[in-house]
Image (cartoon, rainbow, N blue to C red):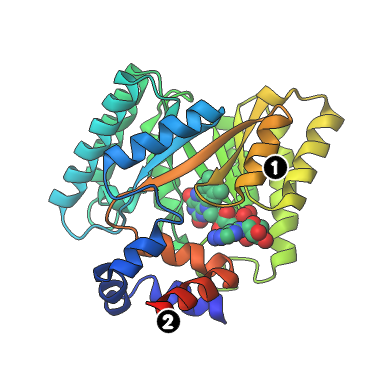
């Protein structure tokens, strides 16, 4: 119930205006967001790199309403890619296709995405396409496969809560695509996604085993110790060395677990979001853990 309500509010303008205009809102968002500008993000990347983590940077934004906003988002990401190269940061970028205009004009999105992965390839870094709600999954996969980019320049995300994902993973393995596997963060009806957490978890384990049985380098993105233990056990059983895949986690979540995995010899990439359009991202993080809402309410009451 609470999860559904928070995910519903994540798409509403009224609560967005309320939270983003209040200084307390911005302060609370800092728990999950590196800051509002690129300098904040670069500082966070440097610190994480120094500790041994790799990073993927997300310039927050989604569901743009005009082509000019999509072009602006693309220019921002190009600046980020150049900065990553200039400072030799160990970082990729993560981008949402609705930020590049997917809801307006898929042709424009494809063109902007090509600009991004080509610049990433020049700098020997990587673009990950985040996966959004099920309304965009088919279009996102189509744009990804039509881009026909080298596998070391462009990759995709698969959500284990969707019934369709097993078939999508089979197809992506055949393409040799690099996949980030997640549970899925959006509000989905039972007609497209498993309603029960146990089924989402079982699906994640199944898809993880399919992905790690292929020869491509994939990412398992979860903070769930049971999913991590299942991945470690599978890798051990198959004799996969820790550099055959990576774990990924979100900035500000389960930091000790992130450090423990590094210590155990795994590659860990931290997803670092920054920017002023933090509201929907922040609300999805609240929805994932009811205790986060308590934290928010306590802080709002304290002012
Ligand atoms: C690197 C990365 C990239 C992602 N990219 C996408 C994407 O492109 N598309 C998409 O739909 N989803 C994406 N997600 C989100 C993902 O789908 C899940 O919603 C999210 O990771 C929570 O699921 P979990 O696997 O951590 O397991 P859960 O069972 O939800 O959580 C396991 C434990 O992790 C901790 N935890 C999890 N979330 C939080 C939180 N918000 N605050 C505090 N503690 C928390 C808690 O201790 C919880 O008990 C991404 C996640 C990661 C880590």
User: In percent of the image, x 21 and y 48: which residue is there?
Assistant: 70
Q: Which quadrant of the figure has residue 264?
A: top right
Looking at this view, is 193 or 275 the one in front?
275
Q: Is residue 25 left or right of residue 2?
A: left
Residue placed most toward the observer, 268 or 3: 268
Ligand 1 rendered quadrant:
bottom right
Position of residue 82 measured from the top left corner of the image (x, y, whole percent): 27, 25
Judge the density around disc 1: few (<14), some (14-19), many (≥20) Cα neighbours within 10 Å: many
Q: Quadrant of residue 249?
A: top right
* Image quadrant containing the C terminus: bottom left
Residue most extreme to the front: 302
Residue 208: mark: 1
Q: Which mark is residue 64?
A: none
In the picture, the disc for residue 301 is 2
Is residue 248 visible to us here? yes
The percent coordinates of residue 278 (x first, y second) are: 34, 58
* Quadrant into which the N terminus falls: bottom right
Q: Residue furthest left?
A: 68
Residue 20 position within the rendered picture, expressed as x and y whole percent measured from the top left: 28, 67
The mark that comes first in sequence, 2 or 1, is 1
In this rendered view, identify the residue nearer to me: 281 or 35: 35
State left or right for residue 290 relative to residue 134: right
In the picture shown, does residue 211 fall above or below 289?
Answer: above
């Amino acid at each position: 119930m609470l999860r559904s309500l928070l995910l519903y509010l994540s798409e509403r303008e009224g609560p967005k205006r309320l939270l983003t205009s209040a200084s307390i809102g911005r302060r609370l968002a800092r728990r999950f967001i590196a800051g509002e500008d690129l300098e904040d993000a670069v500082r966070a990347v440097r610190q994480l790199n120094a500790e041994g983590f790799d990073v993927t940077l997300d310039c927050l934004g989604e569901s743009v309403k005009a082509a000019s906003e999509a072009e602006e988002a693309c220019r921002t990401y190009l600046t980020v890619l150049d900065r990553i190269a200039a400072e030799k940061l160990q970082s990729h970028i993560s981008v949402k296709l609705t930020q590049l205009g997917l809801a307006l004009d898929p042709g424009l999105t494809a063109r902007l995405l090509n600009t991004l992965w080509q610049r990433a390839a020049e700098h020997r870094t990587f673009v990950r396409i985040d996966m959004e709600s099920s309304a965009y999954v088919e279009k996102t996969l189509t744009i990804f496969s039509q881009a026909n980019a080298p596998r070391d320049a462009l990759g995709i995300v698969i959500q284990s809560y969707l019934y369709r994902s097993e078939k999508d993973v089979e197809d992506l393995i055949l393409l040799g695509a690099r996949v980030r596997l997640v549970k899925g963060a959006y509000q989905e009806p039972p007609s497209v996604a498993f309603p029960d957490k146990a089924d989402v978890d079982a699906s994640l384990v199944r898809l993880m085993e399919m992905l790690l049985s292929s020869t491509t380098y994939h990412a398992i993105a979860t903070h769930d110790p049971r999913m991590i233990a299942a991945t470690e056990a599978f890798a051990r059983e198959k004799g996969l060395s820790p550099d055959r895949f990576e774990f990924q986690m979100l900035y500000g979540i389960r930091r000790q677990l992130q450090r423990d995995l590094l210590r155990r010899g795994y590659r860990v990439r931290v997803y670092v979001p920054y920017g002023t359009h933090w509201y929907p991202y922040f609300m999805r993080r609240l929805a994932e853990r009811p205790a986060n809402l308590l934290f928010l309410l306590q802080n709002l009451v304290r002012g």
